[in-house]
Image (cartoon, helix red, strand yellow):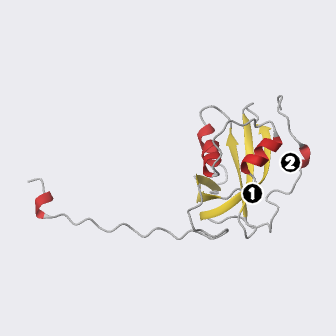
């Protein structure tokens, strides 16, 4: 690793800290419970976050800090309402900005791995918690849109 400050006590915590079950595919209300700042073999730094719902189900996601990929991590910060600049090398700053703050995460199956053929779960979308949603409550799927019936006055000929 380069010159990042990192507290090894935080990294040694059990990922997720909960009951050992994973967040299934779908939308969930979660909080960040652990993080680790690291560097990929390519030299690109990353921030790995462990998130957990109120039932102890967890998911971890690695966010690249490459300039072209920071948008995904920015979505997490915006989802919890943190929009100010932050030093990722300061554990206290990350904990204050992210830990215990609820957000909505959408878990989807990613593209199958070329070697194994296995599709892994990925956190795709991060949003603020909808108003009135209880902690740990899974959001119901949106109803399908009503069909649009074309009237005689909308036919272009």
**CA neighbours of label 2 inside 10 A, class few (<14), some (14 to 19), many (20+):** some
138 lies above or below 76 = below
Residue 96 in the image, given as x and y percentages of width and height: 77, 47
Given the current orientation, which residue lies at the most extreme left position?
157
Residue 100's disc number: 1
Left or right, 74 with respect to 140, comes to right
Query: Residue 12, relative to residue 131: is it above or below?
Result: above
Q: Point out the tag, 2 or 1, that comes first from the N-terminus.
A: 2
The mark lying in front, picked from 2 and 1, is: 1
- Along the horizontal axis of the image, is 35 left or right of 105? right
- Residue 94 horizontal/vertical position (percent): 76, 44
Instruction: Kindly state the secondary structure of the residue where label 1 is placed.
Output: loop
Residue 149, quarter of picture: bottom left
Residue drawn at point x = 79 percent, y = 59 percent:
16
* Left or right: residue 11 compared with residue 56: right
Name the residue tied to disc 2.
11
Mark 2 falls on what kind of element?
A: helix
Where, quadrant-wise, is the N terminus in this rendering? top right
Q: Which of 17 and 129 is in front in this view?
A: 129
Residue neighbourhood size for the residue with mark 1, other residues' Cα within 10 Å, grouped as few (<14), some (14–19), many (≥20) = some
Is 62 left or right of 91, judged from the image as shown?
Answer: left
Number of on-image labels: 2
| Residue 93 image point, x, y percent | 78, 42
- Which residue does the image show at 85% across and 35% down from the upper left? 5
- How far is the residue under mark 2 from the one under mark 1? 17 Å
User: Between 130 and 116, which is closer to the camera in this rendering?
Assistant: 130
What residue is drawn where x is 73% and y is 66%?
57
Kindly identify the residue that appears in the image at 59 percent across and 40 percent down.
71
Q: Give how far across and how far down residue 127 sits, in percent.
A: 58, 54
């Amino acid at each position: 690793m380069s010159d990042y400050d990192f507290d090894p006590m935080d990294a040694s915590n059990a990922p997720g800290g909960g009951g050992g079950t994973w967040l299934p595919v779908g939308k969930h209300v979660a909080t960040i419970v652990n993080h680790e700042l690291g560097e990929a073999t390519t030299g690109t730094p990353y921030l790995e976050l462990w998130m957990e719902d109120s039932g102890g189900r967890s998911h971890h996601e690695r966010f690249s800090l490459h300039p072209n990929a920071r948008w995904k991590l920015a979505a997490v910060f915006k989802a919890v309402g943190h929009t100010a600049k932050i030093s990722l090398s300061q554990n206290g700053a990350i904990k204050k900005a992210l830990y215990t703050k609820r957000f909505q995460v959408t878990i989807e199956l990613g593209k199958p791995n070329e070697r194994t053929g296995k599709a892994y779960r990925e956190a795709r979308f991060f949003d603020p918690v909808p108003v009135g949603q209880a902690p740990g409550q899974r959001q119901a799927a949106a109803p399908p849109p009503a069909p649009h019936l074309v009237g005689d006055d909308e036919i272009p000929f």
